[in-house]
Amino acid sequence: MKDILTIAMPKGRIFEEAADMLRKAGYQLPPEFDESRKLILDVPNEKIRFILAKPMDVVTYVEHGVADVGIAGKDVMLEEERDVYEVLDLKISECYLAVAGLPDTKINDVAPKIATKYPKVASSYFREQGEQVEIIKLNGSIELAPLIGLAERIVDIVSTGRTLKENGLVELEQICHITSRLIVNPVSYRMKDEPIDELVERLSKVIGG
């Protein structure tokens, strides 16, 4: 595996956009690549192996060296705070983190409850605002929390705002802009500097395009 570059990528929208970028950068990915349900995809002609994972797990794989390189959202990077190098903003899968809730909801004066997948980011944000809040970590369907009385507010990713609107929620504050980043394992950066530098250079040309 010494001469193989292993890349961890999230399934879904980021995978599709990243695969398109890699093709534009000249990497020959097979047509069936996009439809495959396999979790490990080998592309021998390019000496690349792909690991498909949940977004939060990509940074773990890269930090522990089972993947040399990864593609991860800035939201995951902020939340996980892993020991990896962030080498390139791919400028794909653009969205932002925001605070949202039901309109005209009275906020608990003592410690409003905030539901989120991003407890570290949310805690840091409200601390910077000088607000004391209670964070409730959820793993999915964050929009449910205000509807069932679990929390007064949520902190979540917003792309089009459609999900918020369909659930009767309104955006209250934007926290930060999010794009996908190319991340690298520090040891791999030393051991496999040539293929990694080539990957960065080719992707940079696509971005600058």
Image: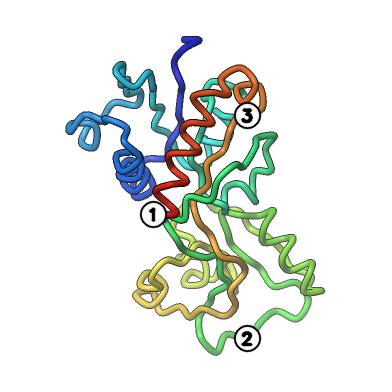
Q: Name the mark nearer the viewer: 3 or 1.
A: 1
- Category of crowding for the residue at label 2, using alpha-carbon neighbours closer than 10 angstroms: few (below 14), some (14–19), many (at least 20): few
60 relative to 14 in the view: left or right:
right
Q: What element carries label 3?
A: helix
Residue 147 in the image, given as x and y percentages of width and height: 47, 72
Residue 200 in the image, given as x and y percentages of width and height: 50, 38
Tell me which residue sits at (62%, 42%) in the image: 86
- The amino acid sitting under disc 2 is Lys
Q: Are marks 1 and 2 in contact (CB under 8 Å)?
A: no
Q: Distance between the residues labelled 1 and 2?
A: 48 Å
Residue nearest the observer in this picture, 6 or 28? 28
Residue 13 in the image, given as x and y percentages of width and height: 34, 50
Residue nearest the observer in this picture, 162 or 50? 50
Tell me which residue sits at (53%, 59%) in the image: 178
Tell me which residue sits at (32%, 23%) in the image: 41
Disc 3 target residue: 63
Q: Distance between the residues labelled 3 and 1?
A: 30 Å
- The amino acid sitting under disc 1 is Gly
- The amino acid sitting under disc 3 is Glu
Q: What element carries label 1?
A: loop
- On residue 209, which mark appears? 1
Disc 2 target residue: 106
Residue 174 in the image, given as x and y percentages of width and height: 58, 74
Q: Is mark 2 on a helix, strand or loop?
A: loop
Q: Say which label, 1 or 2, has the lower sequence index.
A: 2
